[in-house]
Amino acid sequence: MSDEQKVKLPRVAKGPRPMMFDDEANDILLSMNVSLLNELIVTRQRLDAVERLLESKGILNQSDVNAFRPDEAATTDREALREDISNRVFYLLLQQAERAEKAIPGDAPGDNI
């Protein structure tokens, strides 16, 4: 199936979110921390694999990695990645703000600034 034929499903779950704590803010913080933990674990595992492969092939060593300075294109790519990860980590807060904005049109945070 090509990318054009894939069906994009909505990412919003139906029904109430299960709560672990009495305060919804604690549930949101827990979810954000778990998301960050998952991102960090995956990143560290991939980074470890890349560094080991490159070093085993004699392509570079740890000091090369430590001395690297990104160019403009790499900086732009990193900013896009940072934004993508931030959107996933802050997903619940963004979704909550969106719901609040729809519930009270014209009275959303920042409207009176």
Image (spheres, helix red, strand yellow):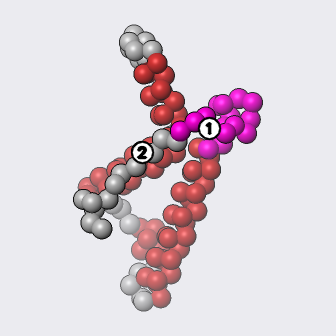
Q: Which mark is residue 97?
A: none
Q: Quadrant of the N terminus?
A: bottom left
Residues 19 and 50: in front is 19
Residue at (46%, 68%) from the top-left corner? 66
Residue 64, picture quadrant: bottom left
The question of residue 24 being in magenta is answered with: yes
Query: Which three-letter amino acid code belongs to the residue tagged 1?
Result: Arg
Residues 100 and 112: in front is 100
The question of residue 71 being in magenta is answered with: no
Q: Which residues are magenta?
A: 14-31
Alpha-carbon span between mark 2 and mark 1: 16 Å
Is disc 2 placed on a helix, strand or loop?
loop
Q: Residue tagged by mark 1?
A: 17
Is disc 1 placed on a helix, strand or loop?
loop
* Left or right placement of residue 19 versus residue 1 in this view: right
Residue at (50%, 81%) from the top-left corner? 52
Q: Residue tagged by mark 2?
A: 10
